[in-house]
Image (cartoon, rainbow, N blue to C red):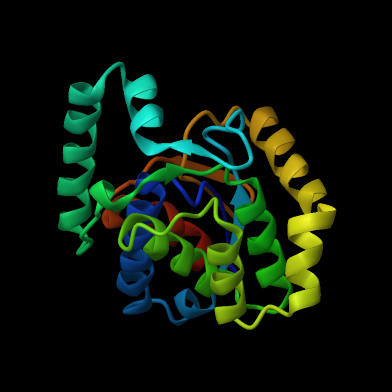
């Protein structure tokens, strides 16, 4: 079986685009390789902005500070919107009001993995943030998204209030540092091949195919 570790931040638009490109690559590979449908994908945490307060900051402040002004930020996000359109995404950056600290969200992805709903939860987080403009620093919104994939209340509360799975987040961050990962998405295929960035489907498929042939 081929495994793919994806270091990703659920509040990174390039990670959503990279997810779509990976899905397209696997669909292409499945035409010639039956084993492609059994590729095991594991989501690993990476925080682009770990320094943000737990309740987040205003999106306007975040983008202006990060990109050196609102005009430069607008140019940057226009380019991402165009890249999103190419993979069928309508990214609504104007709807986003708060930039959250994503640590809790990553911990909930691990909780979702325990019930085999991590892929659904990651997709829902991406959609909520980049398409619907949901405030992911708001606990009620987070709880609603977690409940939607049938996470139980006890687990959700343990993540939100008791730091459940935060050790996993720290391990991922330490591993990404050791691997020299500075940007995401970052794909690791069968623990040997690294692929950085939202690569086009053909490039991702080319990187995966040798492992499929070996399996």
Does 64 sit above or below residue 42?
above
Question: Left of 95 or right of it: where is 153?
Answer: right
At 21% across and 22% down in the image, what residue appears? Answer: 72
Residue at 30%, 16% (x, y): give it: 68
Residue 5 percent coordinates (x, y): 59, 54
Whether residue 164 is visible to the viewer of this picture, yes or no, is no
* Residue 13: % across, % down: 36, 47
Q: Where residue 80 sits: x, y (%)?
A: 23, 42
Dividing the picture into quarters, in which one does residue 43 lie?
A: bottom right
> Residue at 51% across / 64% down in the picture?
122
Q: In this view, does 117 lie to the left or right of 89?
A: right
Image x and y of residue 50, in percent: 61, 33
Assign the C terminus to one quadrant of the image: bottom right
**Residue at 16%, 39% in the rendered image:** 78
Q: In which quarter of the image is the N terminus?
A: bottom right
* Closer to us: 31 or 107: 107
């Amino acid at each position: 079986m081929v495994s793919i570790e994806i270091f990703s931040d659920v509040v990174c638009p390039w990670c959503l685009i990279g997810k779509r490109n990976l899905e397209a690559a696997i669909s292409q590979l499945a035409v010639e390789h039956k084993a492609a449908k059994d590729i095991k994908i594991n989501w690993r945490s990476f925080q682009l902005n770990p320094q943000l307060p737990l309740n987040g900051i205003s999106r306007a402040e975040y983008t202006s500070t990060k990109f050196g002004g609102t005009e430069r930020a607008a140019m940057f996000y226009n380019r991402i919107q165009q890249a999103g359109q190419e993979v069928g995404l309508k990214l609504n950056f104007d709807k986003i009001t708060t930039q959250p600290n994503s640590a809790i969200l990553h911990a909930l992805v691990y909780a979702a993995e325990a019930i085999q709903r991590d892929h659904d939860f990651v997709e829902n987080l991406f959609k909520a943030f980049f398409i619907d403009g949901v405030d992911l620093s708001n606990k009620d919104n987070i709880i609603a998204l977690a409940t939607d994939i049938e996470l139980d209340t006890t687990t959700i509360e343990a993540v939100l209030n008791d730091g459940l799975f935060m050790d996993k987040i720290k391990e991922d961050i330490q591993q990404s540092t050791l691997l020299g990962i500075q940007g995401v998405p970052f794909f690791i295929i069968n623990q040997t091949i690294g692929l950085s960035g939202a690569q086009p489907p053909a490039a991702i498929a080319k990187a995966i195919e040798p492992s499929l042939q070996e399996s």
